[in-house]
Image: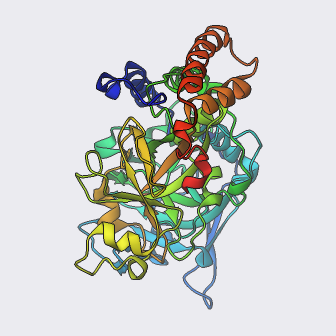
Amino acid sequence: MASESPNTESQKPKSLDDLKRTVQSAVTPSYCYGTLPLSPSDGSLFFKKDEGSDARYINFGALDFKDEDILKLVEVSQRATFGRGDKDVLDESYRKAWKLDTTQFSTQFDVVRSGVLEIVHDQLLHYEKNTLPLEAELYKLNVYGPGSFFKPHIDTPRSDKLFATLVVVLPTVHTGGNLLLGKDGSILNFDSAKLVYAKENKEPQIAWAAFYSDIEHQVLPVEDGYRVTLTYNLHLPEADKAQGVPKGLAFDSCTAVVSALSTFIATPTILPTGGALGFGLMYKYPIDPTKADLTKFTGALKGNDAMIRDACLSVGLTVAVKVLYYERDRYLNGSDAWITDDVKTDDDIGWDTESSLRSRFRDVGKRVITTDIESKSKSERKIPTVWVTPPNRLLTTNLAFATYGNEPSVGYMYGDLVLIATLPAYKERIHAMLESLGDKVDTTSLREKAQKVLEEMEEDEDESDDEDEDMDSDSDGYY
Ligand SMILES: O=C(O)CCC(=O)C(=O)O
Ligand SMILES: [Fe+2]
């Protein structure tokens, strides 16, 4: 048959290895941090115990407050709890700190006016073309005294628009209390105590750090003094309007991925009759399991995930975020993996039954993915898929999520999502790619090579005529 791969050597084409390597070595930052002077007019914090009580205040922008003043703040606070599964628990072996809810305090520090959000936007959303408003929701004030800490956790999403967490450390004299991002601080060891009160500082300054909320983090014990923080949830209210075009920092990574993708697409032995390219998303995303529609989701991808989506778009592939279900250890070799646009609830799928994944998904009418390089399947239920990065390639560990959040889960959860790029049949995808690349990059050699392969294919086709009639080249139809 003309359009089928001639031999099994093509099972591991070099262009696939190159693509995998390029995608895996492209890393974009998942956090940013900085300092800002805090003037006396911005530094006032008013606080009270409850509705009936008088308010007190401390000015963190002046240098004349003492630990005794902070103790007054502690007096009106509560012990900080955290979420374990769906329960709010007080366990001082896991989290030892005090907290004030937003009803109990008011700060003159204006995070919008401070300019921090613009920096965060630029650093963490640098793949988005339009300036998307990033909304900061003040969440808690926390006080960490000597011996206070918060062990590894990830922040519980309370909305599917949650994007990042911002911690503002107010200028108080203390040591310890470093904020560690990643396992044991593998991503960042943020020694905010040194930043807020360095000797060379002429005036008080805040230290701030923002990071994707699904990144595991912890606060090391405070050794001396009091560490006072404001935490904010950063939302992207218009995430669905985001149209990604890479710019700035990540351009080189993106260019490398675009180039590896072009070569991959132009390899005629790979899925000649079409299929899909699968990317396990690097980050976790809050999803509402009761909502079926994931199409809005594609706009709010973070860092590398956004870059991969953009690279796919720029070579003419269509992409969508999907949910992947598979029986562990089997997806790479077997065909028992299913994707769906819907986040299925246990009731839909019947997780509690003894039946196999296959029969459960057959009932909800979804299709199986195989990992065959060659597309031999004529069944429209099957999408031959090449995985560039495996599902579940997460920057965070699963530990924190499964058990510990910063508050009990309230219906949103981080889901394991995949980015699926539809790979049309060879001829079609070459045309789409050349059209999309346009004159942005030099496509001369690619064009010549593709043209040659296309001519050969056309000759073959003339000989064998309608042989591939029943191949489903309408890739959109797969989903
Ligand atoms: O205080 C910090 O640096 C982070 C606190 C935190 O992780 C949280 O409140 O969830
Ligand atoms: Fe946290």
Q: Quadrant of ligand 1?
A: bottom left
Farthest residue toward the bottom? Answer: 52
In this rendering, is residue 75 above or below 452? Answer: below
Left or right: 280 in relation to 209: left
Considering the image in quadrants, where does the N terminus appear?
top left
Image position, residue 404 (x, y; %): 33, 66
In this rendering, is residue 383 above or below 452? Answer: below
Report which quarter residue 92 is drawn in: bottom left
Image position, residue 119 (x, y; %): 66, 39
- At x 54%, y 60%, the residue is 231
Compare residues 318 and 96 and report the one nearer the observer.
318
In this rendering, is residue 315 above or below 468? Answer: above
In this rendering, is residue 477 above or below 207? Answer: below
Image position, residue 19 (x, y; %): 44, 26
- At x 59%, y 79%, the residue is 48
Looking at the picture, the colour scheme in use is rainbow
From this viewpoint, is residue 110 visible?
A: no
Report which quarter residue 136 is drawn in: bottom right
- At x 27%, y 65%, the residue is 94
From this viewpoint, is residue 274 visible?
A: yes
- At x 68%, y 31%, the residue is 432
